[in-house]
Image (tube, rainbow, N blue to C red):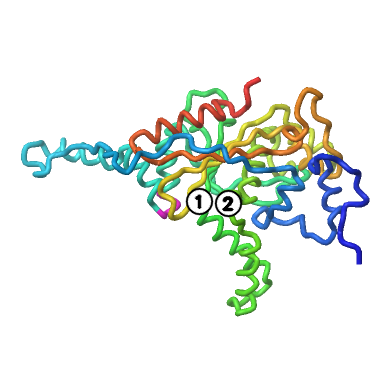
Amino acid sequence: MKPATATNVKKTAYPSALSISELISAYPRERLFVHPLLWTRRHLGLLGCEFSDDGILSPPPSPTTVLPSPTHNQSGIGNDNKATWVERHFAEQYSDTNKARCLATSERLHDKCWSLTQLLKEFECYRDQVRFRFACRVVANLPCKYLALSSQSPSPRRGLAQLGYLHLAELARHRRIKLSRRSNNLGPPNPQDLHYIQKQLRLLTPNNRYEDPYLVALLIALAQKQAQGQRLGDRDRDNINDDDARHKLFGGATNVSSQMLLVTSPGDTTWLHIYTSNISPEFLDKLDRPSRPSRPPPADTDTQSRLGMVISHRRLAFEPYGTLSQRLTAVVQQTIGKDGYVNG
């Protein structure tokens, strides 16, 4: 029996230059058309996506460093007016230092997300998921905190500056839920189902949890949301039967967009993980029109950078907590700016 190979597909130095339909038909024995929660390294390889570890943005303080702490009257309110003491108490309780500490040490997703929006100040959390589109249709809702510039922001293009936030404990939970639904068991899980779920979790979870394929899907979904436009709603989109008409209305990104994803991990109180990627219109076009070969990139650009994705992984130290807000805001403004597009 012959192994499943891409013998009927044209040879190319970049697998990502093939259309999505060609990639799926080239490997008939592999389940490639699956929910992004079930993506593997195979999906990243076929799409031309790779991670790049770009190191540390700011080193953590040495163990001997003593961080300054706010001073307060140890004897309570004896020498102060009660209102003044209450104001100082709440000022310390909701200071940037405590918010950063909460983001680093809390295990509650709600507390982490609230702290993050408070540290970024101009951003608000608008929803708990982002939509992943294929052939200009929504095919999956990806669990992820979606943050965008607040409606109070003075930026005229506030709807374009966006980023995502994911706690890896939530990724494991939603992946387990997805596998449980695939077991087709309407009752409580039996030993065979539990064994199947555990086996699939081992296969889907990469050795390096910070290079999970699901993180790539989230960056793609953020880029799709930014490129879709607001000319028609999703209900009208689904009523359009012609692929070219849907692509004209909702696809066809013209700028290279820079997307950012912030990730925290359970048990890791040292680093905030920052993922960024410049996603080209050619790459998004492959997902908008999966049956068509990719558009050739401009002659003066690198083929892999236009038809694939390079995901930069950097780490930002939580400590010192008092300066995390300024450091994180600087990284966000430097990466996605106020409009979310790459300059030049």
Q: Which residue is mark 1?
A: 167
Left or right relative to 182: residue 272: left
Look at the magenta stretch and give its main secondary structure. helix
Left or right relative to 71: residue 226: right
Q: Nearer the viewer, residue 94 or 100?
A: 100
Query: Which corner quadrant holds the N terminus?
Result: bottom right
- Direction top: furthest residue: 344
Determine which quarter of the picture holds residue 53: top right
Q: Nearer the viewer, residue 94 or 52?
A: 52
Q: Residue at x 71, y 45 (%)?
A: 133
Location of residue 317 with respect to 188 vertically, above or below:
above
- Direction bottom: furthest residue: 191
Q: Which residue is mark 2?
A: 143
Question: Disc 2, disc 1: CB below 8 Å?
Answer: no
Image depth: mark 2 or mark 1 in front? 1
In the rendered image, residue 7, in percent from the top left (x then y), is placed at 92, 52
Determine which quarter of the picture holds residue 121: top left
Left or right relative to 74: residue 216: right
What separation in Å lies between label 2 and label 1 (alpha carbons)? 10 Å
Left or right relative to 3: residue 343: left
In the rendered image, residue 38, in percent from the top left (x then y), is placed at 67, 57
Q: Residue at x 50, y 56 (%)?
A: 169
Per the rendered image, the range of residues in magenta is 107-111
Q: Residue at x 60, y 38 (%)?
A: 312
